[in-house]
Image: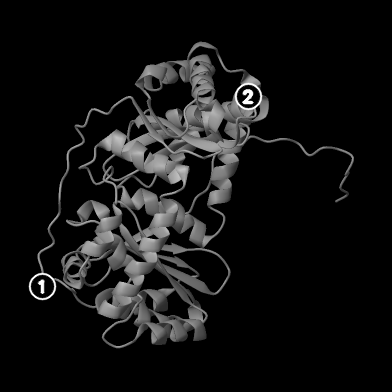
Amino acid sequence: MHLNRKQQPEFKNIENINIPVPKKINLNNGIETYIINAGTQEVVKIDVTFNAGSWHQEKPLIATIVNEMLIEGTKSFTSQQIAEKLDYYGAFIHPNPTKDFANITLYTLKKYLPETIKIFDDIIKNPVFPENELRTFLNKRKQQFQIELEKVTNIARREFNEQLFGKNHPYGRKTKLDDYDLVNREDVVQFHKRLYNSKNCKIILSGKIDDSDIKLLNQYLGNKTWNLENETKFINFDISHKPEMESFVEKKNVTQSAIRLGKIIIRKDHPDYHNLNVVNTILGGYFGSRLMKSIREEKGYTYGISSVMVSLKHAEYLVILSEVGANVAKNAIADILTEIKKLREEQISQQELRLVKNYMLGELLRSFDGPFEISAGFKNIIDLGLETNYYDKAVEAINTITPAEIIILTNKYLKEDTLIRTIAGKYN
């Protein structure tokens, strides 16, 4: 077939996306497991997720320390031996603690899974949290924390979260420098015993998967119940905090101020959620957004600005964030509010809406390009207990939303006077 390179290819809209749905099984001990068999490379990823994020800790820092110190030694291997063995097999283990969950992931070549899953299993079940390793970890993190506290973006993030959720809520509570000195090994050990067990986790197995990989997973993590000698206690918190509408944290001698505007919004399972996500993308969710054009390109206040919808297990919030010139923070906030007002009052053109729709659908396609990307996309859905047709609903919403609906949604959820404001640095 002759290809005419002088003729532009026909443009086609993306009407649906064929996303492989994970196969759900239970291991022999009952662990809920999702299998994603995709890709051509001989690689495997195992994601193990526990309900053991900072939401569940009774003392600051403990959840993060436990998750990130799993690889610092077990009853069978020292931290150095673990590092050497993983390096030998070309594998690596990645811990990722969040506010809700404790995640630990193994990336390995399929042919070495029998060797690497043995190490992975031992790390999860039998960490010893050596005292000397704990002190080294805490000292290093304390130094990093002191450095991070000097950055206006981190000051604004911490202040915004406290402002939004309250200082006593796990989503809003600020870590303090003294907290590092109050950590003791017994708290770390007890947190692991309480929450890292076979009844408090889910697994995603992805890559070029066959029955032998599932058999290995069952042999180690699924062969019997484990670490159930302690009761799994969960802590509940209520979000009934009424936030201050504006907070300013002064930091002298800075050239930029960090600003955040936002509010608690509807959850991912709400019927309006996917449509609101389109509104958010128009406002500040991609490089060609309204806020980027106004605040960056026209006004020159910043190198970048974005609007993000953040999903947590017990809450969802929208936040507009940027670092702007210290002398234009007030102007930047005023212009952000102006862009929201325009979105509420003026109908978007079909051309701009079509651009946003194509961008969003293209990003969805890109985000599921490969087994590990598919597992990452579904992990959030699984963690939050959403239906597997979540992305089908997203595609439908993107394709069908109208300019009139965008005005209705913006007025319903994003009125300017409902957004709290946080500024760190100077506020001129």
Residue under the point 50% across and 11% down: 345
- Local crowd size for mark 2, using a 10 Å CA cut-off: few (<14), some (14–19), many (≥20): some
Q: Is residue 292 left or right of residue 388?
A: right
**Crowd class of label 1 (few under 14; some 14 to 19; many from 20; radius 10 Å):** few
Image: 409 above or below 100: above
Residue type marked 1? Glu
- Residue under label 2, please give it: 352
In the image, taking residue 269 as reference, residue 362 lies left or right, namely right
Q: Which residue is mark 1?
A: 229
Distance of mark 1 from mark 2, alpha carbons? Answer: 58 Å
Residue at disc 2, secondary structure: helix
Residue 219 found in image quarter: bottom left
Instruction: Count the marks.
Output: 2
Q: Secondary structure at mark 1?
A: loop
Can residue 362 be seen by looking at this rendering? yes
Q: Residue at x 29, y 39 (%)?
A: 162
Q: Nearer the viewer, residue 302 or 27?
A: 302
Height in image: 102 above or below 112?
A: above
